[in-house]
Amino acid sequence: MRRTYVSLYVHAVWSTEHRAALLEEVWEAHLYATMGARCVDLGACPIAIGGVADHVHVLARLPATLAPSRLVGDLKGETSHLIRHRLKPGCDFHWQRGYGVFSVSARGTDFVREYVLTQRHHHAVGTLIPTLERTHIDGY
């Protein structure tokens, strides 16, 4: 029996509502583990998850059956619930409505992985790559 081969890597990025610095560093391990587990539940392979106080990045390999919009929607929903009910009960946490998703070549995954995992450093020293930080279309 032949199976379909899919090599689909995506880099997704989204921010907190109004880009508010709400994501606490002490939450990172739990937040990123939850995101990774949800990726696996959806059939995706999480490669790197990282971020700073106002946004997160996810690099993952997707199966043919998973749309990037479903991946991001599920991750945003799962983590909103986690933050509002377990990490900071009662807070009015929301992610932004939109997100950015970029295709990544198999050869480019190492570069993007390193970029995602070193977000704190890139933001501290100003070595951001604007095209990998886009979370919306201007004017929307």
Image (cartoon, helix red, strand yellow):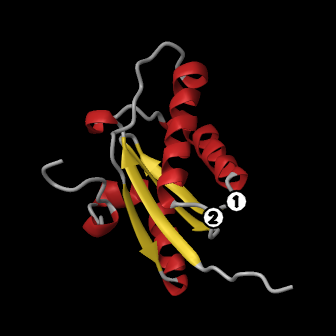
Query: Are the residues tagged 2 and 1 within 8 Å (C-beta)?
Result: yes
Residue 21, image quadrant: top left
Name the element at disc 2.
Answer: loop
Residue 95 appears at what percent x and percent y?
A: 39, 36
Amino acid type shown at disc 1 = Gly
Name the element at disc 1.
Answer: loop
Residue 88 appears at what percent x and percent y?
A: 52, 20
Q: Residue at x 46, y 76 (%)?
A: 104
On the rendered structure, is 133 left or right of 13? Answer: left
Q: Residue at x 63, y 38 (%)?
A: 30
Residue hosting label 2: 65
- What's the mark number on residue 43? 1
Can you say which quadrant of the picture contains the N terminus?
bottom right
On the rendered structure, is 127 left or right of 92? Answer: left
Amino acid type shown at disc 2 = Thr
> Which residue is nearer to you in this view: 43 or 107?
43
Q: CA distance from mark 2 to mark 1?
A: 8 Å
Callout 2 environment at 10 Å: few (<14), some (14 to 19), or many (20+)?
few
